[in-house]
Amino acid sequence: MKIPLEKFGTTLISRELGSEAFKAFQPTLLELPPHEELEIDFSGILTLSPSWADEFLSPLLERFGERLVLLPSDNLSVHATLKILQEANKRPFKFRQ
């Protein structure tokens, strides 16, 4: 299942908004078959803050582990944020090339 983060906006900032987006996303997670990957698409994202991403991506990483796959992005804020989260979680994300 591919999830375009752009559906939550193009400027993804603040811990509160990340938490709200994660809660709104919960019904969609129930539709994911047990062995299917969850792909996160960063297309169209202008800004991704560490606080928003921590509230949204960190719980997904905890829940899905290797099944969470991040799609490529040229956005520097996405790259910087993902680096921070990997260090904070002490766990790498799986990236699709």
Image (tube, rainbow, N blue to C red):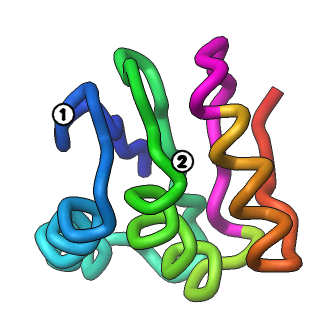
Q: Look at label 2 and name its amino acid.
A: Glu
Indicate which disc residue 9 carries: 1
Residue carrying label 2:
39
Rendered image quadrant of residue 20: bottom left
User: Which SS class for mark 1?
Assistant: loop
Residue 67: percent from left, percent from top: 67, 67
The residue under the point 18% across, 78% down is 23
Marks counted in the figure total 2
Earlier sequence position, callout 1 versus callout 2? 1
Which image quadrant for residue 37?
bottom right
Judge whether 78 appears above or below 70 on screen.
above
Where is residue 92 shown, x and y percent of the image? 86, 64
Question: At 42% from the left edge and 51% from the top edge, which residue is drawn?
Answer: 1
Quarter of the image containing the C terminus?
top right
Q: Identify whether 44 is placed above or below 61.
A: above
Q: Position of residue 7 (x, y in %)?
A: 18, 37
Question: Would residue 44 be found to the left or right of residue 28 on screen?
Answer: right
Give the left or right position of residue 89, taking residue 40 as reference: right
Residue 51 lies in the magenta-colored region: no
Q: Quadrant of residue 77?
A: top right
| Range drawn in magenta | 67-78
Q: Nearer the viewer, mark 1 or mark 2?
A: 1
